[in-house]
Image (cartoon, rainbow, N blue to C red):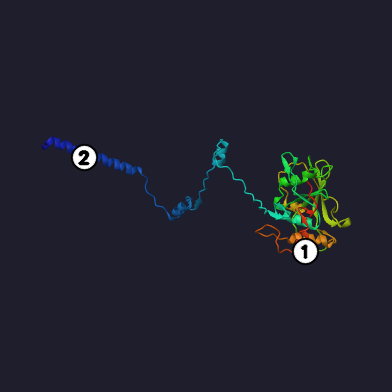
Amino acid sequence: MPAQTAPAARKTAAKRTTRTTAARKTTSASRAAKPAATKTSPAQTRAAKAGTKTTAAGKLKTTPKTTSRTRTGATPKTAAKRAGNTTSAPRRKASRAPKPKAIEVLYSGKVFRSRLEARWAVFLDLLGVNWDYEPCHYEIGPDLYYLPDFYLPDHQTWLEVKGAPFMDTASYAKVLGAIAGPNPVPLREYPYTPSQRLLLGGPFSAPRHGLVPVHTLITPAGPLSASLTHATFSTGPGGKTAITPAGPAWDTVPATGIKAARRPSPERLALLLEPAPHLGPAGDDRIFAAYDAAYRLAFDETTRRVADNQARTLLAALAHRRSGRPLGVPQAA
């Protein structure tokens, strides 16, 4: 490459000097524009970490926390709802405790849906009370169908067996509507008029001498109204078992055949299914023995039948009956 002449070399050197001077001016201007660095005091450092700031007097002043609320005071979720945004996740309903599962058992040629129903069948057999188990379905209200547990033909009385967890709004409406509702269940024999009595059978408890076990008896009390009375099992004329009301009605309730919004309260269920026994003589030994046997009754876990280790007297008494009738007596249709 040919060497530059003296004039050309001088021009190149002048350009380089101009560029260097301009760069120095730019650097000086940028340094002047930056604020002078200030020293941070220990208090200010601690305040910055804690989300506070210091005043001119050096005191700490807490900075209020900012929230995610909008200017109208609503949260973003509420604001979205007001704007018509429905994409938020739906609210979960509160969980409900499931009903306990009933265990089917076999007794006297019948398959019972629960052990409590089988206990009542044994109790009735020991008292010589004839029974029919789940004889028929009935329509007792708008879209409300009822399958009673037992019918006692000699007493023209229905018997509904329930544990407290199974007495829900539908069950309560059924037992009331079956007797005093707009379409009550009929008798199962001539003249097939509307039934007048339904007995509620709850869990058995250990009987005590001097106390008479009682049960709730449902009877009509006027148009779409049911009366709740206490009733007892006793020995009537001729040694036959009788179901006798004990005292006046303790409550009168509507019987519309329509399910209520809420199920009965625990206190109400106790009054319906496990009322306190009455003071007085325990009655004859036959009634007391039937309650005691039904309470102590045990079932074999494998065969789901009455356990073979039960008292011989109990097994001997049950052997004389089958399917709710004494042996040799035909069952009603």
Q: Residue at x 82, y 56 (%)?
A: 233
Residue 72: % across, % down: 56, 39
Q: Which residue is mark 1?
A: 313
- In this view, the residue in front, 179 or 147, is 147
Q: Is residue 225 above or below residue 270?
A: above
Disc 2 secondary structure class: helix
Tell me which residue sits at (88%, 56%) in the image.
238
Which residue shows up at 26% across the image and 39% down it?
A: 22
For label 1, the crowd category at 10 Å Cα-Cα, with few meaning under 14, some 14 to 19 and many 20 or more, is few
Q: Which residue is mark 2?
A: 17
| Residue 211 visible in this rendered orientation of the protein | no
Quarter of the image with the N terminus in it: top left
Does label 1 or label 2 sit earlier along the sequence? 2
Q: Nearer the viewer, residue 191 or 250?
A: 191
Q: Are marks 1 and 2 in contact (CB under 8 Å)?
A: no
* Residue 281, percent from left and from top: 85, 61
Asked if residue 107 lies left or right of residue 93, the reply is right
Foreground residue among 177 and 271:
177
Disc number lying in front (1 or 2): 1
Could you tell me the amino acid type at mark 2?
Thr
Give the amino acid type for the residue marked by disc 1 in the picture. Thr
Label 1 vs label 2: CA separation? Answer: 129 Å
| Element under disc 1 | helix
Is residue 21 shown left or right of residue 252?
Answer: left
